[in-house]
Amino acid sequence: MTSTPPVSGATSRIPGLRRPGQDKLPRDIKVMLAAAFLIALGFGLVAPVLPQFATTFGVGNTEAAVIVAIFALMRLVFAPAGGALIARWGERPVYVAGLLIVAASTAACAFAQGYWQLLLFRGLGGIGSVMFTVASMALVIRLAPPESRGRVSGAYASAFLVGNVCGPIVGGLLAGFGLRVPFLAYAAALVVAAAVVQTQLSHERREAGHGKGRNPDMRLADALGVGAYRSALVSSFANGWATFGVRMATVPLFAVAALGAGPEAAGLALAVFAAGNASALTVSGRLADSLGRKPMMVTGLLVTGGATAAIGFTHELGWFLLASTLAGIGSGLLGPAQQAAVADVIGSGRSGGKVLAVYQMTADIGAIAGPILAGVLADRLGYGWAFGVTGAILVVAAASWSVTREPLKRIEGGIPPP
């Protein structure tokens, strides 16, 4: 075939039928991907050494765990404020400011002289983190072509995944020069990311907020009136519970206590989860744009839920790793579709700071509550119950999506304002 026939308006939204020139990601999206990689790389530098660094101040494992938890708690508490700031000042200023706040707090952690100083500085970092997290989601929604929202969300998740994989490796090497060095390296990575966004992102007046020349802010009540957004909140909570909570806190304990394996087995489980996630992300974004958000959400949640529940009933390392891999695949299937569905609700012509803040809060609540309740279940009833309940929550989220109207058809303008 030597020529491409004209693409009608009805079919231009289907990725497989778009003209080749339409398949390229916009330059601004590539800038956001570069920033995402730097942020994830930096976070991976400090994540492995943070608890160990806390214990150098003469505290036990519980106090060290609080250092990790305070970051998530501050993200949760200040998420509504982050949404309000975006509505007032726009995505880019809040994004850059959030990065610089985390950079400053992380650098301060490197010079902390006591446990309480470290706790304070790490908590302040959580405030900046939720600012740039919500702002980055809002920017990606605004900058992504409506017909490629799933693919862009998949590419963004992949950039974070690669950074998260590379970060601990580099961080482990830097820790050899002292536990404070990774904090300084993370701060430097965040400053570079802020500079990339501020200088390389096009300066078109596309910032959100009220006022002349700006886009209106979507009301949370309007978003809650849309079934796809309500289902996204349920699945965000379930995914936060399982993927960001139980996977990081309960899976390592299960590997040691139930399987009798060493810490390396827990690390291997996290690695195969990431591998499964990466393999799914190579196709899930495009499928979300062609097949729709709903099929990918239901499939991803069911695969993740079934595999997560199965982990609690494994007795051999091989089956444990297989279940972890399948859970990673399921998570990779649902991630781009979930964010694209929220983008469909908001649309490209409006700001969604408050709507996105609540969406992010549900994931953070799940990530905090999941490990706690799973730990209680594991102690009192066994790991089978802990992972079984976690899988059941994911299945409930799949059921919610199964009765939800497909949001892809609303792709061109978002849900019209009342």
Image (cartoon, rainbow, N blue to C red):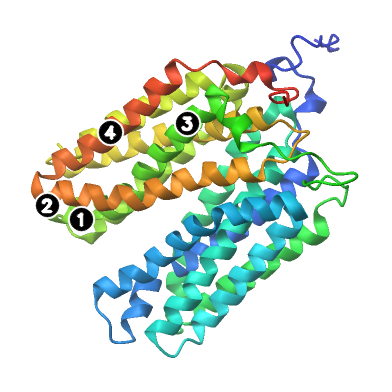
Nearer the camera: disc 2 or disc 1: 2
Helix, strand or loop at disc 2? helix
Q: Where's the C terminus, which quadrant?
A: top right
Q: Which residue is mark 1?
A: 253
Q: Earlier in the sequence, mark 2 or mark 4?
A: 2
Q: What distance separates the C-alpha of mark 2 from that of mark 3?
A: 30 Å
Residue 51, picture quadrant: bottom left
Residue where numbered disc 3 is placed: 334
- Estimate how packed mark 3 is, as few (under 14), some (14 to 19) or many (20 or more) residues with alpha carbons within 10 Å: many
Q: Tell me the residue at 68%/19% (across/down).
A: 410
User: What kind of residue is marked 3?
Assistant: Leu
- Binning the other alpha carbons within 10 Å of mark 1 as few (below 14), some (14 to 19) or many (20 upward) gives many
Q: Is residue 39 left or right of residue 200?
A: left
Q: Position of residue 118 (x, y in %)?
A: 44, 80
Relative placement, left or right, of 103 versus 199 is: left
Mark 4 to mark 3 CA distance (whole Å): 15 Å
Mark 1–mark 4 Cα distance, whole angstroms, equals 17 Å
Task: Identify the amino acid type marked 2.
Answer: Asp
Query: Which residue has dot 4 on it?
Result: 391
**Which of label 4 and label 3 is nearer to you?**
4
Q: Is residue 48 visible?
A: no
Residue placed at 24% from the left, 48% from the top?
373
> Identity of the amino acid at label 4?
Gly
Pointer 2 residue: 379
How far, Cα to Cα, is label 2 from label 1?
A: 11 Å
